[in-house]
Image (cartoon, rainbow, N blue to C red):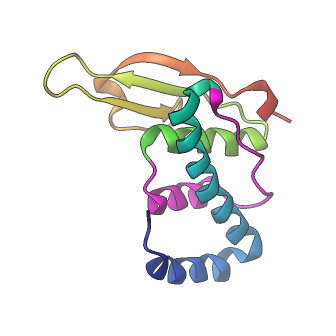
Amino acid sequence: MPDPVRALPALARVARRHGPAGVALVAWTVLAYRRVRRQLARGGLDAVCLPAPPPGGTDALVRRALRRADGNCLESALVLQRWYARGRVCRTVVIGVSAPGDDFHAHAWLDGDDDPHRHELAELLRRPAPAAWLP
């Protein structure tokens, strides 16, 4: 979890640059990532249900908030997928895995993103945005 004392200057910068809409989007992003983490632990991908994000802001602001919140790749991809769905952009979450062995790992990203790890992984699952997320 991020240090609240260190987060205050970053939140003040968001307020100066993006106004109240930016602060609302950052708050939504952090709460959404925490909700996704809980929902994945309780019921897997099918349990993920996020409210619509507030209007305004950019995907870059959402991505920065996710980096500061220290979400993992799957949580981040699902939150971004929900953010894009608000704007009627259907993005697919892709989950890939490496070959079995000592250095086995999995990774998730949004289809179409320039992710440096995607070329070394075999796709295991593609999850389009739920229809309920698209207005």
The reply, left or right, for residue 59 in relation to residue 9 is right
**In front of the other: 116 or 74:** 74
Residue 117 location (% of width, % of height): 33, 34
Residue 125 location (% of width, % of height): 49, 17
- Among the 4 quarters of the image, the one containing residue 54: bottom right
Q: Is residue 124 above or below residue 102?
A: above
**In front of the other: 108 or 5:** 5
**In front of the other: 18 or 9:** 9
Seen at 56% across and 51% down, the residue is 34
Image quarter of the C terminus: top right
Query: Looking at this rendering, what residue extends furthest in the left direction?
Result: 102
Magenta span of residues: 47-71
Seen at 58% across and 77% down, the residue is 11
Seen at 43% across and 56% down, the residue is 70
Q: Is residue 113 above or below residue 128?
A: below
Residue 120 location (% of width, % of height): 28, 25
